[in-house]
Image (tube, rainbow, N blue to C red):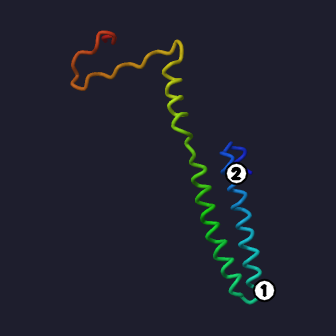
């Protein structure tokens, strides 16, 4: 599937296959209802499957929005600031337009 090509989280790939299977089951239940005169048991199965499709679709949406753990984000910030030879961040200019700190070159 496309989710493997874009390196989506593994849970998202599994949920996409589950969603595809549930949609196929929904179609099979619909055909069974059509040819059997709409028995009540199949109506309940059809509605239950529709609810499962919604739940799976929402879980898939949330699985695709994975932003990693807090530790990963902190480590990324620390790595960028602690790289050997990296230039330190420039200080922000004074909001009042006053003199700049001594280590900032003057124009």
Q: Which SS class for mark 1? A: helix
The residue under the point 69% across, 77% down is 45
> Foreground: 103 or 70?
70
37 to 88, vertically: above or below:
below
> Foreground: 91 or 38?
38
Instruction: Determine contact: label 1, label 2, CB under 8 Å.
Output: no
Whole-angstrom CA distance, mark 1 to mark 2, is: 34 Å
Picture coordinates of residue 55, whole percent (x, y): 60, 63
Q: Quadrant of the C terminus?
A: top left
Q: Count residues near mark 2 (Cα–Cα under 10 Å), then give few for <14, some for 14-19, many for 20+.
A: some
> Position of 26 compared to 87: left or right?
right
The residue under the point 71% across, 49% down is 2
**Number of callouts:** 2
Q: Which mark is residue 74?
A: none
Picture coordinates of residue 70, whole percent (x, y): 51, 37
4 to 20, vertically: above or below:
above
The residue under the point 55% across, 39% down is 69
5 to 24, vertically: above or below:
above
The residue under the point 61% across, 70% down is 51
Q: Count residues near mark 1 (Cα–Cα under 10 Å), then give few for <14, some for 14-19, many for 20+.
A: few
Picture coordinates of residue 92, whole percent (x, y): 33, 23
Q: Which SS class for mark 2? A: helix
Q: Which residue is mark 1?
A: 35
Q: Which residue is mark 2?
A: 13
Picture coordinates of residue 39, whole percent (x, y): 71, 87
Q: Earlier in the sequence, mark 1 or mark 2?
A: 2
């Amino acid at each position: 599937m496309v989710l493997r090509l874009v390196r989506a989280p593994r849970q998202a790939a599994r949920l996409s296959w589950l969603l595809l299977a549930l949609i196929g089951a929904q179609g099979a239940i619909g055909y069974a209802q059509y040819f059997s005169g709409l028995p009540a048991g199949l109506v309940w199965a059809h509605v239950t499957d529709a609810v499962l499709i919604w739940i799976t679709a929402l879980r898939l949406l949330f699985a695709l929005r994975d932003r990693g753990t807090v530790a990963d984000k902190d480590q990324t910030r620390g790595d960028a600031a602690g790289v050997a030879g990296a230039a330190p961040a420039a200080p922000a200019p004074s909001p009042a337009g006053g003199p700049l700190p001594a280590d900032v070159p003057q124009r």
